Amino acid sequence: MRLAVVLAACGAVLAAAGGCAGGGEGGRRGVTIFAASSLTDVFGDIAAAFEDAHPGVDVTLQFAGSSRLATQINAGAPADVFAAADERTAAQVEAHRVTIFARNRLAIVTPPDNPAGVSGLASLTDGDLLLALCASEVPCGALAETVGGPALGAAADTREPNVRGVLTKVLLGEVDAGVVYATDLAATGDAVGGTVIDHPATTAYPLVLLSDNAEAAAFVDFVLSPRAQKLLAAAGFEAP
């Protein structure tokens, strides 16, 4: 399995151009995936499983906020597949095919001892609370404002470029609470406290095929397969 090697080798190219697709040494084939930050852990597992099932294919992953990735793609970054955290952002790029592959909902996270006594969504607008949200242009930020309304957006003391930024603020104890995805809460275990927000709103995750790379189409099909869907479910994602 060559995923880690490819990520290291492509680091400079990803920073400059956003991708590292195409053939590699020894005639190996590559596929470059741009994915929302909330997919960081599970897409690493899915990419490894895909490489195991497709000998000779190397997967390169790049993670960031969905809106930033869409901007990079529209600027010419050579991504083959875009896994966005909402349909609005996915629609900003030109696609060969778009398929919903998972859903997610929001959760509140706090430091483990919950020093501010956060008790639920209503308590997040307490003026004495230090609150981190995603930026409004990022799917997790837009969903937070849908769930909590304008008052929640106005209560934010910091707006982060992606959901991992919010989670980091909480892990470092720099804020009393943050709003992230349920999957982020599940992934951090005892490192944070928190609860899934009881609200019907969810966000759909579209998988956008951007190129005619055969390996890219195979990756899209693989994410929709029972094997990858089982990994997504284990990470806390809901079925599409």
Image (tube, rainbow, N blue to C red):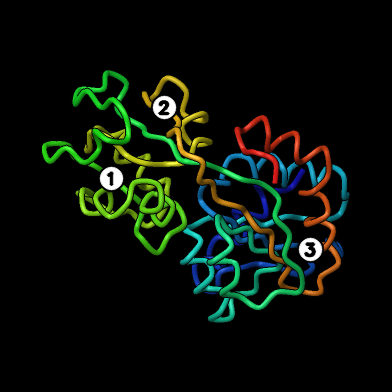
Numbered disc in front, either 3 or 2: 2
Reply above or below: 148 against 12: above
User: How far is the residue under mark 1 from the one under mark 3?
Assistant: 35 Å
Label 3 sits on what residue type?
A: Ala
Q: Nearer the viewer, residue 56 or 78?
A: 78
| Label 1 sits on residue | 132
Compare marks 2 and 1 and give the one earlier in the sequence. 1
Assign a secondary structure to mark 2. strand
Picture coordinates of residue 1, whole percent (x, y): 77, 43
- Closer to the N terminus: mark 3 or mark 2? 2
Residue plotted at (59% across, 56% down): 35
Reading the image, the residue beneath label 2 is 195
Q: Are marks 3 and 2 in contact (CB under 8 Å)?
A: no
Residue linked to disc 3: 216
Label 2 Cα neighbours within 10 Å, binned few <14 / some 14-19 / many ≥20: some
Q: Could you tell whether 111 is left or right of 18 in the image?
A: left
Q: Residue at x 58, y 59 (%)?
A: 84
